Image (cartoon, grey):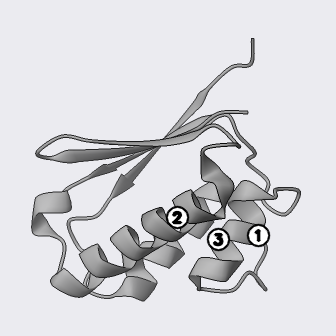
Amino acid sequence: MSLVIRIELDASQWKTGLDFYDALLTALGAPHWHGRSVDALIDSMVYRDINTIESPYTIAVTGADKMSARAVSSMVQAILALGKAGADAAGIKFRTSPMTAEWVPDG
């Protein structure tokens, strides 16, 4: 059984989709050249071997009630695309509650 790392992101100041990507990629230890797109997230989170932090991990997003609509849209689009790209097969799950969103990739 692997140790599950918990990564917490504070979304209360996110105004754009880039704020979402920057926070997530920084927390994952992504290289400076990592793209800020859904396809780039799929490559590094589902197919792996790019980021410093590899699954299993839980990403908990707090302050989601203060996010801008653009940041919410980017986060939701990424979650949906990761699911379609086989995140389930990689053990990635997404959980939400009123003030916290958790992303749980295991595998």
The amino acid marked with disc number 2 is Leu
Q: Earlier in the sequence, mark 1 or mark 2?
A: 2
Determine whether 43 is above or below 3 in the image: below
Q: CA distance from mark 1 to mark 3?
A: 5 Å
Q: Position of residue 79 (x, y in %)?
A: 45, 63
Q: CA distance from mark 1 to mark 2?
A: 14 Å
Outermost right residue: 49
Residue 24 is marked as 2
Residue located 41% across and 75% down the image: 77
- Residue indicated by mark 3: 41
Q: Are marks 1 and 3 in contact (CB under 8 Å)?
A: yes
> Can see residue 29?
no
- Residue indicated by mark 1: 43
Q: Are marks 3 and 2 in contact (CB under 8 Å)?
A: yes
Q: Position of residue 54 (x, y in %)?
A: 75, 45
Within-10-Å neighbours for mark 2: few <14, some 14–19, many 20+:
many
> Does residue 63 appear to the left or right of 9 in the view shown?
left
In-front residue for pair 52/81: 81
Determine whether 50 is above or below 99 in the image: below
Q: Earlier in the sequence, mark 3 or mark 2?
A: 2
